Image (cartoon, rainbow, N blue to C red):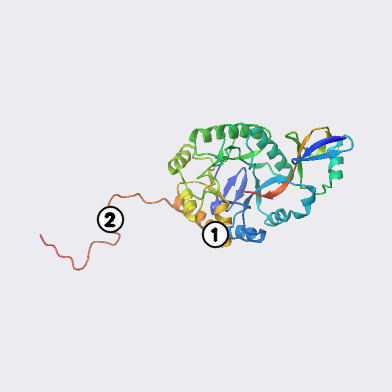
Amino acid sequence: MISLQVNGETKTLNSACTVADALKTWGYQSKDIAIAINGEFVPRAFYTQQPLIDNDLIDIVTPIQGG
Amino acid sequence: MAIEIVKDDQWQLYGKRFNSRLLIGTALYPSPQIMQQSIKASQSQIVTVSLRRQSPENQGGNSIWEFIKQLNCELLPNTAGCHSAKEAITLAQMSREIFNTNWIKLEVIGDEYNLQPDPFGTLEAAEKLINLGFDVFPYCTDDLVLCQRLHDVGCKVLMPWGAPIGTGRGLMNSYALQTIRERLPNVPLIVDAGIGKPSHAVQAMEIGYDGILLNTAVAQASDPIMMGQAFGEAVTAGRKGYLAGAMTKRQTAQPSTPVLGTPFWHQTN
């Protein structure tokens, strides 16, 4: 089992997996998201290859209004 | 020349042409519907957007993004909330993927109290983002040398503040803004932040600024839709006033009605 911080909240996964696997597990369906892991941008094309490891800090963002 | 006056006074920002010189934010409106109507009333063609964390539970609730897309405006994503060059660069990369644009309104905040941009972080991030292929719109202070350095590293548009974000205080340092205008005559300059009233926008345009970026002044007005229209008209009025060339100030009065033939006048000496 690995523990991750996702948008500031602790989440666990049964085993190490890719970003794509984790998004599916967590129920993210929208294409209007972007991801950074440990402060580094992860392009969508890398979701199926990028592994998640214990203690990763993950930011998942979506469009909002802005000034 | 980075900006050129063309037919109907269009202007260019990173190669894209626009009729409206008003850029407007999409936040703080009473409702998404009023946001849409206010922006339409302003005739702005460029709107600012942002990114925030979202949990999967809230995915169905992002209707504001749908309202923004319906405007069919050019999107200018911002890096609001970033306090370092690294944060801003990462958020810019995330924005580029989601919004499918190289445009980025670069905000690197240096002081939380007045949301003053960090000049050092802004410059560092601007240079790196430009090397990554971004078209950077830096939100910066009205410091001439900072503006020159930002231009030197490749910013083809500069956005000095009028006053701190959301204060509505207008042009706090008109002299500094005019100096930037005079020293960088061919760079598109946009006053970003601090505009509170249409007259503030007129003042900025009359001193030769090319555009205005605002949000709160419209969104928090008693009637945002009417205020959106007012700002659209103010920006146009200020621009025309600048192009027309204002008269020279005088120290003393001079009658505008011809003096010759004034009735009831009799020479006494």
**Residue at horizontal 89 percent and vertical 37 percent from the top:** A14
Chain of residue at mark 2: B
Depth check, front residue: A35 or B159: A35
On the picture, is B84 further left or further right than A45? left
**Residue found 71% across the figure and 48% down from its top:** A63
**Picture quarter with the N terminus of chain B:** top right
User: Residue A52: image x %, image y %?
Assistant: 83, 34
Specify the subunit that label 1 lies on: B
Q: Is residue B133 above or below residue B239?
A: above
Q: Picture quarter containing residue B220?
A: bottom right
In the rendered image, which quarter contains the C terminus of chain B?
bottom left
- Amino acid beneath label 1: Met
Give the SS element for disc 1.
helix
Same subunit, labels 1 and 2: the answer reads yes
Query: What residue lies at 58% left-to-right and 58% top-to-bottom?
Result: B42
Residue linked to disc 1: B227
Residue ID for mark 2: B254
Mark nearer the viewer, 1 or 2: 1
Q: Are marks 1 and 2 in contact (CB under 8 Å)?
A: no
User: Do we see residue B37 in this rendering?
Assistant: yes
Q: Position of residue A5 (x, y in %)?
A: 78, 38
Question: What's the residue at 59%, 46% (across, down)?
Answer: B12
Badge 1: residue crowd in 10 Å (few <14, some 14–19, many ≥20): many
Closer to the chain start, of discs 1 and 2, is: 1
In this rendering, does residue B5 appear at all? Answer: no
Give the amino acid at mark 2.
Gln
Measured as percent of width and height from the top left, residue B20 is found at: 57, 53
Q: Residue furthest right?
A: A14
Label 1 to label 2: alpha-carbon separation: 36 Å
Instruction: Estimate how packed mark 2 is, as few (under 14), some (14 to 19) or many (20 or more) residues with alpha carbons within 10 Å.
Output: few
Question: Helix, strand or loop at disc 2?
Answer: loop
